[in-house]
Amino acid sequence: MKKIILGSFVLVCSVYGDIVTILPYTANIDYDSVATKSSKKEGTIIGVYTSIGNLNYLLEFDYVATNIKYKDANTTNLKQDDITLTYSKYYKSFMLKGGIHHINTTDKDLCDANVIIGAIGGYQWSNYDKYSYGLESYYSQYKDGHDENEIANKINIFQITPYYSYSKAININTRNIIGFKLNYIIADDYKTKNYTSYEIADTLYYKKFFTIIKVYCGKMKTGVKDSGNTVYNSKDLLKDGYNLKLGYNIQSNLSISTSYAINNFEEYGLTGTTSNKVVVATLRYSF
């Protein structure tokens, strides 16, 4: 029966020109060894991203399980499940996107959350080059959270993220994409009401290889990144960091990649800037 269902699913996708992508990934997180700067010791992330779509639409689903250990052996691990579901509709020169990111966590500070995702974007081609631009928006609600006075209070966070990217075909084997994002957060339930940060990313494709370099700076608290897939559901103050990803396309529908990131931030309730190091391994398969 499972074979019949899978076969029917592949047949339907083939008839309508849909492409299915499955992307499992895993990550390890190492925190600062100084206890006065970070209470966390290490963490693991296991997730799977799946999508189905064609030139007209894209349906995306992402599930992530996080487990973080603390330096104090008597402190219970933080365990968290993230579920993201989005739908994008593409037209000739623009796109619309909507969705939700739900967080179920053992964290007792902000507790569970729902993040509403919305975006509108435009794009145009000039020969083989592509220009993309748009605005992402996020509304995060932590209905059982606590404010910075440790008083139980519903925490509402608004974020708008305008973006721009330019994709340049250098030659038949090489393409380069550079992108910019600005994240502006309105946090009326915090002592500081506004936070602004910036992101720049450069992606280079050469034959079967690709590399992505990301850098960010500014200030972000309880913000959203990666088009809604990543939510920083804490009151830590993110400052700056970078990410380097290297990948290889084994076949046209199969690729592997690994990335290394360093994030500098102030952990809520502690003093001084600390950091964590994140290593991610990813497999991507499409059919």
Image (spheres, rainbow, N blue to C red):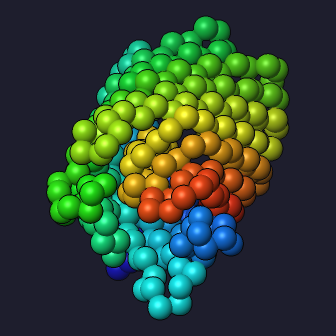
Q: Is residue 186 visible?
A: yes
Q: Is residue 94 left or right of residue 30?
A: left
Residue at 47% x, 91% y: name it.
74
Q: In this view, does 75 lie above or below 8?
A: below
Percent x, y of residue 88: 35, 36
Query: Quarter holding the C terminus?
Result: bottom right
Q: Is residue 26 visible?
A: no
Q: In this view, does 234 lie to the left or right of 111?
A: right
> In the depicted view, which residue is nearer to us: 66 or 93?
66
Q: Is residue 194 above or below residue 122?
A: below
Query: Quarter holding the N terminus?
Result: bottom left
> In the depicted view, which residue is nearer to us: 256 or 268?
268
Q: In this view, does 49 lie above or below 97?
A: below
**Furthest-top residue in view?**
126
Q: In this view, does 265 lie to the left or right of 158?
A: right
Percent x, y of residue 194: 36, 33
Residue at 62% x, 42% y: name it.
240
Residue at 82% x, 29% y: name it.
173
Percent x, y of residue 2: 38, 77
Quarter of the image where one finds residue 5: bottom left
Percent x, y of residue 43: 57, 73
Residue at 66% x, 25% y: name it.
178
Figure disc tally: 0
